[in-house]
Image (cartoon, helix red, strand yellow):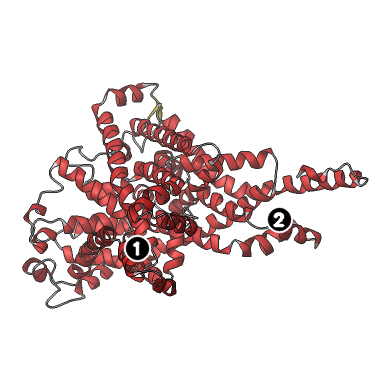
Amino acid sequence: MSNAISTAPGAAVGIKDSRETEKRKAALAWLTLPALFFFLVFAVIPLAGVLILSFASWDGIGAIGAAGMDNWFSVFADPGLYNALGLTFLIMIVSWLVQTPISLLLGVFTAGSQRYRAALAVLYFLPLLLSSAAVAIAFKALLDPNFGLATGLGLPFLAQDWLGVPHLALGLVIFVIAWQFVPFHTLIYQGGVRQIPKSLYEAAQIDGAGTIKQFFHITLPQLKYTIITSSTLMVVGSLTYFDLIFVLTGGGPGNSTRILALDMYLRGFRANLMGPASVIAVILVIIGLGLALFLQRLGGKDKQGSQLEGL
Amino acid sequence: MGGSMVPKRGLGQRLSRLNIPGGLGGWIWLAIIILPVYYVVITSLKTQAGYFGQNPLALPTSPTLENYQLVLEADFATYFMNSAIVTLGSVIPTVLISFMASFAIVRGSGRFLKLVNGMFLMGLAIPLQATIIPIYLMIIRLNLYDSLLALMLPSIAFAIPLTVLILSNFIRDVPNELFESMRLDGCSEWQTMWRLALPLTRPAIVTVAIYNGLHVWNGFLLPLVLTQSPGLRVLPLGLWSFQGEYSVNIPAVLASVVLSTLPILVLYVIGRRQLLAGLTAGFSK
């Protein structure tokens, strides 16, 4: 931009020109105002509001009063918080461990040129069309011990009280999350694989490297940034699995699937304790921001621009 | 397409390229995806007696559409309309104002624009569902509680950061010479935006519109918290309350699942490529 200012004879014109351009460019700012307005009013103000409400007492209907640090003390003294925190991170980590290898392999598989793979891919992506509510309702019916999959396939070990036993419910939640979200990440990996230059594989073939060697020495390193993008979306996204778990288990049995987002909702809108619920919300925001920044760092500074692209 | 390459390779080489574990895994995953979908569809066509009497995975002996009739009578047409209104009412403004902001961020300069851009980027990292309580409070104070508008306003705000990011990446790809020639032709920036940038970013606009549209269409938390009347239910909420009321009639519940997915399924059949590109919103660009 500054190269408009030259030392050539026409310098005076150049300066005038660049000033005009600067003016023109700064004048564009007003175009951001509508977006800025919406974002400030319905995202930034609520973000500040959630912090303020964490120091207030409110039942969701009546007047709002000051509560000082009471909400914070009560939430941190409540074992429910640590249960929810633990579950949130457990589901986040196990989901990542389950979904990443499956999505990566399926992404490589569907990126292949064979016709039948393209046909399979059409079906793989079906879960993407369903709402979380629809997925949760479908699995509830499917897992009925008498009239569901267990009887249909004749596999008695599937006939469990999936929603009634804590560790089974937790496993079910992780499975259904994978069922719903693996297709999305497969799609991301498929795109990543397709961008790897074919010449790399041709060179490896000439060197006599087999399929497995090619996978570990070309595909995997070339997918580094795709892995970071997918992982960031997966990990930050896991904080918002609210709707699926809400419809599937409602946080139960007991509190065995009550993750932070659900804990926030139940405290706020069921127990009418908006103050403590806001404390949970603040914790959610901090975790989300922290994770996103941490995963950005993993991507390396030089690639930061394109990393933000993938966030 | 690659078929002409094949004869050049020996049979042994072709066999070694056959990825048996990959293929096997591919078919297993297919079964995992298809079984639930198959179960939902066939069960939705069964009578209550068929549901209790038949093998759960057997095709219905006397297929019936009465479950679908029951679902339609339970006001699903209203839920569908509500979902359509909220989705269009969120996506159109989102894309329009985000496009304008992206154009300014890419073509303009100055501290203000940098600040705005930085703020939107921060917005990407924040789980915005965490702001639901203050949003609930604001919606009550604005007298918008229990209205469809209450669902649109936060949906627009939530969608802006990602939309701006994707659109500005595309506008950045437009060659500078094109902008220069518009300027030399005496076009204002406003004209340049609509006549040059908009047509050139159309694929990206379709992509983000689909991405945002699906998110709003399938959204659950905002309608759950911000509406109350049965007449204002959107599809996911209608689905949820329907399964609560008809929990003994599983075929009807599953018919409601199929029916609520049908519009998106039709889109998938018509424009699969566009839809899939939209689903990842250019994450794999």
What residue type is disc 2 on? Answer: Asn
Residue beneath the point at 13% across and 45% down? A164
Residue A140 in sight from this viewpoint: yes
In this view, the residue in front, B18 or B128, is B18
Real-space Cα separation, disc 2 to disc 1, in angstroms: 47 Å
- Whichever of callouts 2 and 1 sits on the residue coming sooner in the sequence is 1
| Residue A76 x %, y % | 31, 24
> Residue A258 placed where, x, y %?
25, 39
Q: Look at the picture and state if B256 lies above or below A184.
A: below
* Type of amino acid under label 1: Tyr
The residue pinned by badge 1 equals B79
**Image: A127 above or below B262:** above
Question: Which mark is drawn over residue B176?
Answer: 2
Element type where label 2 sits in the image: helix
- Nearer the observer: mark 2 or 1; the answer is 2
Quadrant of the image occupied by residue B51: bottom left
Q: Is residue A183 visible?
A: no
| B243, B263: nearer the viewer | B263
